[in-house]
Amino acid sequence: MGNDKTNMIVAIALSLAVLLGWNYFVAAPRVEQQRQAALQNKAATQPAGPDGVPSASPKEGGPANPVPGTLPGASGAGGGVVPRETAIARSPRVTIDTPALAGSIALKGGRIDDVSLKNYHETVDDKSPRIVLLSPTGTENPYYAEFGWVGQNAGPLPNGDTVWTADAETLAPGKPVTLSYDNGAGLVFKRIVAVDDKFLFTVRDEVENKGANAVSLYPYSLVSRWGKPHTQGYYVLHEGLIGVLGADGLQEYTYDHLAKEPALGNASTKGKTWAGVTGGFVGITDKYWAAAAIPDQSTPYTGSFTERTDGATKVYQANVLGNVQVVQPGASAAATQQLFAGAKEVNTVNAYQANQNIKQFDLLIDWGWFHFITKPMFRALDFFFHLFGNFGVSILVVTFCLKLLFLPIANKSYQSMAKMKAVQPEMASIRERYADDKMKQQQAMMELYKKEKINPVAGCWPVLIQIPVFFALYKVLFITIEMRHAPFFGWIQDLAAPDPTSFLNLFGLLPYAAPDFVHLGIWPIIMGITMFIQMKMNPAPPDPVQAQIFTFMPIVFTFMLGSFPAGLVIYWAWNNTLSVIQQYVIMRRNGVKVELWDNLRGIFRGKAADKNAVAKN
């Protein structure tokens, strides 16, 4: 009975772990809103703020209503929403052409507001549209990066209406572009923009004072997103504003969380500021993509996340505001900042952290609290991927390696379980002998365990080991872009997506699409079969309730994992198969009968007996 209880506890613990994990990580309430369809235009000028950072015109192109520590961006373009191509055509542009990026910089405003990713598409079909990351104002959902200066008594400063001149038509790796603007009041501005072969822009803003008076200027950079985007709403994944702000470390704010922050200077702007921090970055992240402003890592700055309202549209912004630079007549000032705009490739992000000395830039990828498990898991998968060229094969190899790593623990566990089966007659005798004295029964059981060197809870270890590995692999499959659209073999063309087949249309044999609400493909069924076989390796519990639990567990898990990433289901099926082989070998070595075949025959005999009983009636 002790073994039966242990098995039931293990089964219930595993069921609860997966059920709670599913509820917490996957089935949590998804927070989403439809995109706002209309952007409204404002035209008003604000006087300088009391903090010495001037408020600029909120009309198209200018920073609007700055408050201490923040730099709100431009308001929406007049004339309503237009197609992206039309909005891009409103401004003369410098073309961006790199191995990884395509797009342009608007000469009107000097913003980086047109970026698409050459190597990433919306579907697994390489002919599908490219992923569009940044878009200009006037589109349905503007999303852009802006650099520049704010200050007082400096004459007109460059804003979104400023038309810059460029010394080249194309920005490419090794071919920077210089933008120039003379404000006609003694200040000459230059912006040198460079880009590497991946996703990093380097922007150096220079200003020369040819006037008669000193001016005080503050360098800034920002990433601005208009309208709340569609989010997947999983607790396992952060989507929204993100940053590492000096000693304050990682800061993550969802779009809804930001709306709950107090007002900053005026009722329409809410947010959070961190003053006097050094190192790090601020930005906005999606599941696979991000745009982040990166200040000079050795100079203090004020970072902030803000939400403001422009008409009916929420504007979310990550801001960097540098310290004041006093530019004397005849002197110059400069500020160098960077922009990451692209895919959150693990090796690329890590390389930027190492080569550019960006503090904790690797946290741009949401490794979670258990990063000490998820990061090594990814490293192992990535290592074998580069050996075999297939992440599905890599999952199989890593699972086998984990089995080898935990082989001593698993062997002891299965050996203990085998011994438990061998002493079942003695355990039954003890229960009969002390049927009316539970205390003596328990003492006799403990003496038996001690005599036979049996650990009654050893059977829990394989389960306890598997749970963290399961969630680590789930996290890696879910958050890393390397797994996105990664094929296995046959019909699995995206390990990060569920098995696309369905039993409702006989796995594609019937000529209609299966509904999504009951998603059960081939691999989840294979996983269920392997789990069923593993369950039947042990004798059936004498308690009918326990027997029912063990009978229905594979069915429940099969449907539950039907909507999980295919890579995770493949892992589980392969892990079950290896466990069955391992348990079979250990049981045979210990001279314990393998119950699998008897249990399977018992099922079919039971069905036959039921049919005969029905026929007789």
Image (cartoon, grey):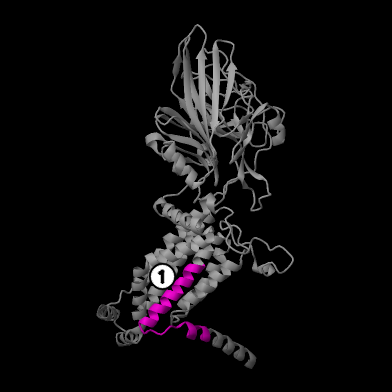
Most common SS among magenta residues:
helix
Q: In which quarter of the image is the N terminus?
A: bottom left
Magenta extent: 573-602
Question: Which residue is disc 1 drawn over?
Answer: 10
User: In the rendered view, would you say 125 is above or below 63?
Assistant: below
Give neighbour class at mark 1: few <14, some 14-19, many 20+ (Cα, 10 Å): some
Residue at x 62% of width, y 27% of height:
75
User: In the rendered view, would you say 48 is above or below 322?
Assistant: above
Residue 399 placement (x, y as % from top left) = 45, 64
Q: Quadrant of the C terminus?
A: bottom right
310 left or right of 236 in image: right
Residue 136 placement (x, y as % from top left) = 64, 32
- Looking at the picture, tell me which residue is in the foreground, 114 or 237: 114
509 left or right of 482 in image: right
- Looking at the picture, tell me which residue is in the foreground, 606 or 120: 120
Residue 225 placement (x, y as % from top left) = 58, 35
User: In the rendered view, would you say 448 is above or below 122?
Assistant: below
Find the residue positioned furthest to the right. 511
